[in-house]
Amino acid sequence: MHPKDFFTPEQKAQIEAAICEAEKLTSGEIRLHIDRTCKGDVLNEAITVFTKLNMHKTELRNGVLFYLSIEDHKFAVIGDKGINETVPDGFWDCIYRQIVDYFKQGKYTEGLCWAILEAGQQLVAHFPIAHDDTDELTNEISFEK
């Protein structure tokens, strides 16, 4: 299955709406990328995608990437340098554990929407939205090319 076909148009719209909603709370920039397969270690692949999407170029270095590989069932959530220097160790662990529970039930859309909104809630304490905040990155889902 091609990653673009993993979600229905309605599901894609739900996920992108969750990104928009989460970003109303925080200056953090959230993206979702979907690959068919992961070519190696899931964290290394997520870092590669993070860089390809220019997520490291946000002003506050506060990008968050949710990475999903559909055929081999691999998932990662990573934050940029600004987030990782600010939040406590294990910051993403709770989100990771809970989204995996959703995935085990086949609830990918629900799990991603929950995780994205939860990331927004968690980031607001460290990266609150500013009155002059601009959306630095697209909220569209990106897919393996």
Image (tube, rainbow, N blue to C red):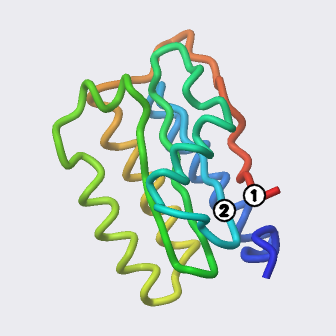
Left or right position of 14 against 67: right
Residue found 58% across the figure and 72% down from its top? 109
Q: Specify the label residue 95 is tagged with.
A: none
Q: Which mark is residue 143?
A: 1
Q: Report how far apart the C-alphas of labels 1 and 2 lie in the structure.
A: 5 Å
Across and down, in percent, residue 59 comes to 53, 13
The answer to whether residue 32 is left or right of residue 84 is: right
Q: Pointers 1 and 2 in contact (CB under 8 A)?
A: yes
User: In the figure, 60 relative to 69: above or below?
Assistant: above
Q: Which mark is residue 34?
A: 2
Question: Is 111 on the left or on the right of 89, as rendered?
Answer: right
Element at badge 2? Answer: strand
Residue 43 position by quadrant:
bottom left
Above or below 75: residue 105 = below
Q: Residue at x 72, y 36 (%)?
A: 138
Q: Residue at x 42, y 87 (%)?
A: 104
Amino acid under disc 1? Phe
